[in-house]
Amino acid sequence: MRAAARLRHHRRVTSPDPFERARQIADDVLFPAAMAVEGADRVPAGQLDLLAAEGFYGLACPAACGGLDVDFPAACSIIEALASGCLTTTFVWLQHHGAVRAVLAGPAGLREEWLAPLCTGTRRAGIALGGALPGPPALRARSVPGGYLLDGISPWVTGWGMIDVLHVAARDDQDNIVTALTPAEAGPTLAAEPLRMVAVMASSTVELRLHSHFVPAGQVTAVSPHRDWLARDAMGLRTNGSLALGVIAR
């Protein structure tokens, strides 16, 4: 059953305040199941569906698109509240918002295609940032007619099998980062190798290997210098810190 169909069966939590809803979900749903999730091979679909039904996949999206439209401090508080219930569930869910931010800042055509389904959680995203990591690029982008070909690896891709689309970052020969959306599906040009983790095994984290993987120009969210991408990426470290803050708060 696709996410959109499953969401119709969820009852909403009663509190109108997003933080209170997050805390209620953490206390009543996520924390009681946390040890079972830790021993599973992936996060139960019902937990991610609940977050979508409660609007949390649209954490910072405009309300007109089905989002919560909260500010950054409120978003961090919500992440901490959810992480206090289940680190793994929150870790998988958190990856989604990088793609949402990219679509919000991207071309109008991408916003029209992707913003509403991403904000409502009927389509879910992960990130594959191999080309953006410091040092020699692990994932390269080569311009070809109609788009780009991607070659290389992207380690630590979380949520495999639970996401519909990847926001991929690859580096071209001008040291620019090309970011684009591509289906989260294995095929002749994209393979996923599961990684053994000491914790959060249910996050279904994999290493992606891409070989002449084509992304159309219409799915490119941005092309920017690597140094600029790194500066923006550093600003996102605060949200990662919210995961740890939530765990110790419990």
Image: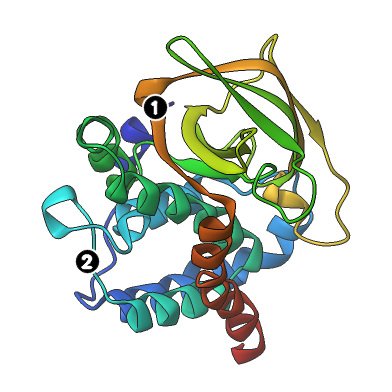
In this orientation, does residue 173 appear? yes
Residue in the image at 24% along x and 38% along y: 111
Camera-side residue: 102 or 177?
177
Q: Position of residue 138 (x, y in %)?
A: 77, 39
Find numbered disc 2 in the image and state the secondary structure of the residue it sits on: loop
For the C terminus, the quadrant is bottom right
Q: Nearer the viewer, mark 1 or mark 2?
A: 1
Q: Is residue 228 above or below residue 20?
A: above
Tell me the SS state at disc 1. Answer: helix
**Image-based side of 94 in relation to 43, left or right:** left
Q: Tell me which corner region of the image, top left, top right, bottom left or bottom right, holds residue 194.
A: top right
Residue at the farthest front position: 174
**Sequence-wise first label, 1 or 2:** 2
Quote the CA–CA distance across marks 1 and 2.
24 Å
Q: Residue furthest bottom?
A: 249
80 lies above or below 125: below
Three-letter amino acid code of the residue under disc 2? Asp
Q: Which mark is residue 165?
A: none
Q: Give the residue at mark 1.
A: 219
Q: Which residue is located at x 79 percent, y 55 percent?
A: 39
Residue 69: assigned label: 2
